[in-house]
Image (cartoon, rainbow, N blue to C red):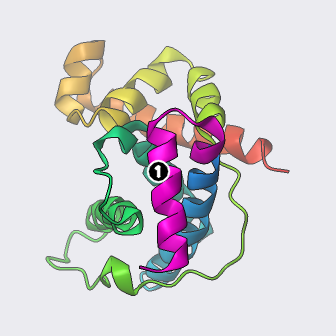
Amino acid sequence: MQSADVDLDHLMIASQAGDAQAHHDLLRQASTHLRAYFRRQLSRYGHGLDAAEDLLQDTLLVIHTRRQAYLPGSPVLAWIYGIARYKLIDFLRARHRSFSHLPIEDAEHVAAQDGYEGIDTARELRKALASLPNNFRLPIEYVKLEGLSIAEAAARTGMSDAAIKVSIHRGMKKLAAILSEARP
């Protein structure tokens, strides 16, 4: 196991125990790995930095909300890349419907070296999400965080399926704008 993996393992365990600084450091280090991964993978399909940042935010939200599902002792980086890989596959399939199989590298072969210090913390994400109006926040929480289907979120909110999709899209753009304003 590499030193970075050990550090992430310790940060994840401390984060699960409620250590806010460890959680901040975990998300920052994950951001560094994931940003390079998404940029590299998306460049193959002609998608730019905006798409990479959107996927990064989606993945960090899942890491934040699902960190209690991580099993101590298993490799954190593999767990993080597993989440990222599924987010990437969903993104590409939604935009490249003619692809039945997308050639995505295995997560353990990814080496990220972009040096960017991530700005994401659980508190910033919660604050940004809470600042969104309910018509944007609730669909994001239901679909992106709780894993409900579009139809289930529509039933919960009383909105149409199309309105849920539009609200998620617009809400994620607003969320990205809020978070980018918070960057130093």
Question: Which amino acid is tagged 1?
Answer: Met
* Residue 4 located within the stretch drawn in magenta: yes
* Relative image position of residue 83 (x, y in whole percent): 33, 58
User: Dot 1 corresponds to which residue?
Assistant: 12
Position of 68 with respect to 174 (left or right) is left
* Residue 95 located within the stretch drawn in magenta: no
Highlighted magenta segment, given as a residue range:
1-23
Position of 44 with respect to 113 (left or right) is left
* Relative image position of residue 136 (x, y in whole percent): 48, 26
* Relative image position of residue 28 (x, y in whole percent): 63, 56
Compared to 10, does 158 lie above or below?
above
Position of 50 with respect to 152 (left or right) is right
* Relative image position of residue 56 (x, y in whole percent): 52, 58
Outermost right residue: 184
Circle 1 crowding by C-alpha within 10 Å: few under 14, some 14–19, many from 20: many
Q: Residue at x 58, y 21 (%)?
A: 130
**Can the viewer see residue 168 in this picture?**
yes
Front one among 46 and 18: 18
Q: Quadrant of the N terminus?
A: bottom left
Q: Residue at x 57, y 52 (%)?
A: 27
- As helix, strand or loop, the secondary structure at mark 1 comes to helix
